[in-house]
Image: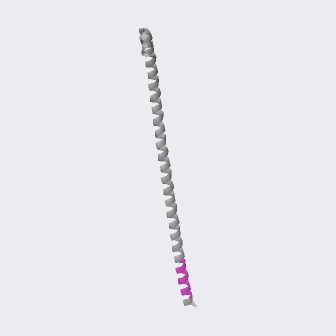
Amino acid sequence: MTAKELKRLGRSDLMEMLLELTKENQELREQLQEMEQKLQERQIHIEQSGSLAEAALRLSRIFEDAQAACELYEQNIRLRCERMEAEWKAKNQSTEGEYL
């Protein structure tokens, strides 16, 4: 609406327009607040998703490290058993010669 058209309107028409614009303004503010709240919630979800993904990755690395430690421990135990078995066989062979 142009300024000329506004000048032609009466006081009651202007007040009615002002009330409508105020109402529209309030509705738009409420929508904006709602959208900002939704945006904040999404940001929180995104941050939590990132945190969860990072946590899952860290747990995965922890399990990989634990698996590697178990494998190393198992390998060391096998080597010790093999050495002990070899020592036992060597000892038994040398004692067999004594009895023969």
Front residue (pair 18, 91): 18
The x, y position of residue 38, in whole percent, is: 48, 34
Q: Where residue 13 sits: x, y (%)?
A: 45, 10
* Figure check: 41 above or below 89: above
At x 48%, y 50%, the residue is 55
Q: Is residue 91 above or below residue 81?
A: below
Which is more toward the observer, 7 or 74? 7
In the image shown, does 61 or 69 lie closer to the viewer?
61
SS assignment for the magenta stretch, majority: helix
Q: Is residue 61 visible?
A: yes
| Quadrant for the C terminus in the image | bottom right
Q: Is residue 15 visible?
A: no
Outermost residue, right direction? 100
The segment highlighted magenta reads 84-96
Give the residue drawn at x 44%, y 25%.
Answer: 29
Residue closest to the far bottom? 100
Q: Is residue 93 shown above or below 79? A: below
**Is 31 covered by the magenta stretch?**
no
